Amino acid sequence: MTPCPQCGGALIGTSADWWRCTTDACPYEMTAAAYDLYAELSAMVERDPDAFFEVVRAHRDELRALEPAWLR
Ligand SMILES: [Zn+2]
């Protein structure tokens, strides 16, 4: 189970579309699509942190290399 990104508590699916944190004081909620992405990326970083951060760096460099929209 992937923990809450804010407090580390347990996340539960409250409906088909939403997940929320079970810790009383924590208001963290996310959509099911965001949860799926979060779980996928968390699994990836646990499996192979170096490969994960390589992907992140490549994505960052790609975005930085783009021409700003206001200069197009
Ligand atoms: Zn939480």
Image: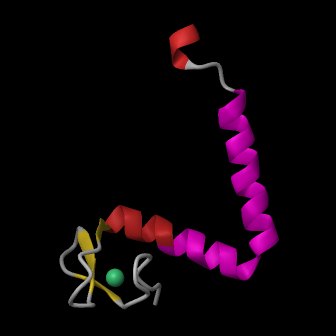
Identify the residue at image location x=23%, y=76%: 27
Q: Is residue 53 left or right of residue 5?
A: right
Residue at image coords 58%, 75%: 42
In the rendered structure, does residue 62 fall within the stretch colored magenta? yes
Asked which quadrant contains residue 17, the reply is bottom left
Number of numbered discs: 0
Is 10 a magenta residue? no
Q: Is residue 53 above or below residue 1?
A: above
Residue 72 at least partly seen: no
Which quadrant holds the C terminus? Answer: top right
Q: Is residue 27 rendered to the left or right of residue 43?
A: left
From this view, report whether residue 9 is shown above or below residue 30. below
Front residue of 39 and 65: 65
Q: Main secondary structure of the magenta part?
A: helix
In the picture provided, is 24 more to the left or to the right than 30? left
Give residue 2's position: percent from left, percent from top: 47, 84
Residue 13, position in %: x, y?
A: 26, 81
The residue sitting at 48% across, 65% down in the picture is 37
Residue located at (74% from left, 62% from top)? 53
Q: Which residues are magenta?
A: 39-65
- Residue 8: image location, x then y, percent: 44, 87
Asked if residue 67 can be seen in this view, the reply is yes
State the colouring used for the structure image: secondary structure
**Placement of 67 over or under 28, stated as above or below:** above
**Residue 9: % across, % down:** 38, 90
